[in-house]
Amino acid sequence: MPPMDNNINSQGNDALYDNPITKAEKAPNTAAPEAPEKLTPGGFTMNVLNGISIAVVVSLVPQALLGELAKALLPVWAGATTVLNLTSLASSLLPAMIGVLVAMQFKLTPIQTAAVGIAAVCGSGVAQPNPEGGFHLQGTGLVINTGLTAALAVGLILLIGARLKNYTILLLSTIVTLVAGGIGWGITYPIVNKLTIWLGDLVNGATSLQPVLMGVILAVLFAFLIVSPVSTVGIATAIFMEGIASGTANLGVVATGFGLLVAGWRVNGFATSILHVLGSPKVQMANMFSKPVTFLPILSSAAILGGVGGALGISGTPISAGFGISGLVGPLAALNYEGWGWSTGNLITIGFVFVALPLLLALATRFIFEKLLGWTKAEYYKLEFE
């Protein structure tokens, strides 16, 4: 057999960890278009948040859409157990998805991306050691610490760059797992866990004492967040929002969806407008931040709806808090919450709060801010998809 060409072998291994950053280091005199833009702290943070937002939707939507329905079908359909198991497993894989999708925001290589995914799982707390050996998965893990660990892993990888050369495939995942994953596992997790439990207890407790006032505050906050880069579901699951806190926060998302549907109806048409309710209001992010006045009717509607929801005791789960009416996640969670149920009166109440009232408020606020005050226009909400 002829001897292997070492140069060819080296190039093959280099391909395993080449990305725009390492290429720029190895070939500093290459053309400018190959060089990445300078990564600022703000850009780094946004990449992490965007990765978390996508991961939350990918992992939690299956359980959010089918979980409550499958529970309702358990008495009459044996296959509902399989649906529950599969969607629950998808939720428990959230930390891995966060690591992978955060890494993808930085355009890391497959090896680097996998290493970030491993570190994120280590720092999430989703996998707990069994005394008899092995691990068991429980819940979704600690979202905040998962994101923090993923950020540490990405930072470590960017710091290492191409220094490992041909040893990347052997050493990178080990270094990232032990350093970034170890910090997330043993140092930041206990601190962040106590902080998030305290914050969740504070929000949930305050809402129990002052449901109307906190309903207004949480609905307005989530109405703003749903059209920002921040994930509403990520926030709710991170601080374990439960009960009326979750329900009223979700009503803020509902108010935003119906408000944007009505505000841009004339210029967007039915298919695009209904996307705000059945899909996500985040499609309006660019329009809203380019013309901040567009927030006024949305937040006004959310404040009223949140107050009504607090007075009626509309409740939900950490997962349902950021989905609005999409997939009937919010209404189903409210009906299935302890103390509620599928009575005729409850069905009428949920239909009123989740559909009739937000639609009426959307029409009223559009009339006030567009017709009476002249502060907004339908064109401000126009969407164009290529």
Image (cartoon, rainbow, N blue to C red):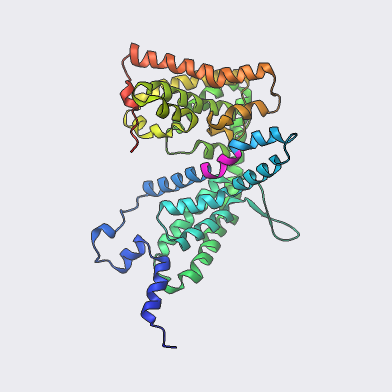
Left or right: residue 66 versus residue 228 is right
Q: Is residue 335 visible?
A: yes
Q: Nearer the viewer, residue 173 or 159?
A: 173
Relative depth, front residue between 23 and 238: 23
Q: Can residue 240 be seen? A: no
Is residue 209 rendered to the left or right of residue 98?
right
Q: Quadrant of residue 346?
A: top right
| The one of 166 and 283 positioned closer to us in this rendering | 283
Looking at the image, residue 111 lies above or below residue 317: below
Q: Can you give x and y, in whole percent of width and height, for residue 356 in the image?
A: 53, 17
Q: Is residue 173 above or below residue 6?
A: above
Main SS, magenta region, reads helix
Image-based side of 270 in relation to 32, left or right = right
Q: Look at the image and say whether residue 18 sits in the magenta stretch.
A: no
Residue 311's place in the image compared with 224, above or below, is: above
Q: Looking at the image, which residue is at 41% across and 25% down?
A: 270
User: Quadrant where the C terminus lies?
Assistant: top left
Q: Position of residue 269 (x, y in %)?
A: 38, 25
The picture places residue 31, in percent across and down from the top left corner, at 23, 62
Residue 271: x percent and y percent? 42, 28
Q: Is the residue 246 above or below the residue 152 in the image? A: above
In the rendered structure, which segment of residues is drawn in magenta?
Answer: 57-63
The residue that appears at 48% across and 42% down in the rendered structure is: 53
**Residue for point 48% across, 23% down:** 255
Question: Which residue lies at the image location 33% right of the left edge and 22% below the top edge?
Answer: 378
- Label count reads 0
Say if the magenta span includes residue 58.
Answer: yes
Quadrant location, the N terminus: bottom left
